Amino acid sequence: MKPAAFAYAKARSLDHAIELLGGAPAEARVLAGGQSLIATLNMRLSSPDLLVDINAVPGLDGIAVKDGMLEVGALVRHAQAERSDLVAKHAPLIAMALPHIGHLAIRNRGTIGGSIAFADPAAELPACLLALGGEVSIAGPDGCRSVAAEQFFRGLFETALSPRDVLTAIRVPLAERDGRFGFAEFSRRHGDYAMVGLAAQARAEDGGLRAVRLVYFGVGATPVRARNAEADLARSDLAAAIGALARDLDPPDDLQATGAVKIHLAGVLLERVAQQLTGRERRPA
Amino acid sequence: MTAHTQVRLTVNGEEVFESVEARKTLVEFLREDLGLTGSHVGCEHGVCGACTLLLDGAIVRGCLLLAVQCDGCRIDTIEGVADSGTIADLQQAFAARNALQCGFCTPGMLLTAAQLLEEVGVPSREKIRARLSGNYCRCTGYHAIVDAVEAVARARANIPPQQGEGRIAEGDPGRGR
């Protein structure tokens, strides 16, 4: 066995999970799909004292339209969301991104809530949530609250979640008729984390694009909005938008590519995503 | 901190009641406690696919699940699936086409391919490649594996073998490299 020893508790309800997390003497972690957490345990990159398994908590695995938003429960598996008609209809950007996440065996187990809570800077879903202007529902010792995506992702693997909180759902505004969505990423092999990726939303208006939101991932500690490029694209000036990326993004060098290469790739992705946004049909990358 | 938990699960149709340490992954539990060594342990972080298993009928990574989490679940391993006879044609095709060399990745390849064929019927070579991309063959025998999966898909659908099947096909960028 590779992981360091830990205690394990299966939460029966949301309240029970919060109670277990609150009562833990030392580091406790929430176990959902475990597709990142158990890997880090196996590599001993993390060694919590207690794992609180929320897989049996009822009410966290639904997908529904509520109060004009699409709500996806934290325990919804990636594969379940991929098959969901509601996600395809109301959150096409998420539907475009899902096939890029790992492989089927990972998506059968990995959860939507887990991807958001783990907040890997190269992950697809945090960028989608930010591009869609979504929000995160959180339950904690002081009750429930909602945090906008802009405020949720705070730093490298750092979010608005406290160690005693449980992420219960994500909520995104329903896609409008004139909504346009684009998604593309570069990875060396299918299923790998992206070297650079782009999730985008815009509104089609008078033959152009308005309310453009371009969110890059794999280029910093959190998903990053390219605000100058957004403004240029809203003026239908793709060349200027690509040029603006050098001001919008400051990707650090990593094992896969230098920052300069990432800026270049970000431009290539923008060209592809701009085509998706301006195309008549929504189509997957 | 070595507390053991009782788990009851169904493995290859048989009920199992065991005591496991929380940190034991499912694939380790199957191999060490139950002696089912057909599922292999490769990278242990979900990348290689050698530990592929069926959890309640869906393929998962056996290294990214804890055995304690599987209380009440149904697990099927390559031993059970092979004994059931449902993938006999796939196994034969792998052997006939030399789609296994060292055999380390084979159980995972078979389970992944079997599920693809169940879902899709006759997938394109591109689709076969995309699905198998989560399973690494370190002997790099991918072409023969794709050939085997494609041949079984066509045979099951009563489609005659393609002309020149098994040789380098046109329009398949992965072939012949």
Image: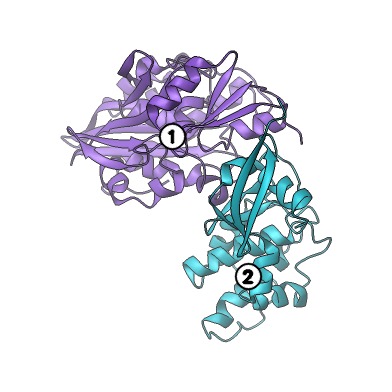
Residue B124: image location, x then y, percent: 53, 67
User: Do tags 2 and 1 sit on the same chain?
Assistant: no
Q: Tell whether A40 sits left or right of A240.
A: right
On the question of residue A228 being in view, the answer is: no
Distance (Cα) linking label 2 and label 1: 42 Å
Q: Which residue is mark 2?
A: B149
Considering the image in quadrants, where does the N terminus of chain B appear?
top right
User: Tag 2, which secondary structure?
Assistant: helix
Q: Image height check: is B61 above or below B131?
A: above
Q: Tell whether A30 sits left or right of B140.
A: left
Q: Image height check: is A202 above or below A84?
A: above
Q: Tell whether A117 sits left or right of A15.
A: right
Identify the residue at image location x=55%, y=81%. Answer: B156
State the image quarter where residue A127 is shown: top left
Residue B97: image location, x then y, percent: 75, 74
Identify the residue at image location x=56%, y=45%. Answer: A106
**Chain A in the picture: what colour?**
purple
Considering the image in quadrants, where does the C terminus of chain B appear?
bottom right
Q: Which mark is residue A12?
A: 1
> Which chain wears cyan?
B
State the image quarter where residue A179 is shown: top left
On the question of residue B114 being in view, the answer is: yes
Q: Tell whether A195 sits left or right of A74.
A: right
Instruction: State which chain disc 2 sits on.
Output: B
Identify the residue at image location x=31%, y=29%. Answer: A132
User: Colour mode?
Assistant: by chain
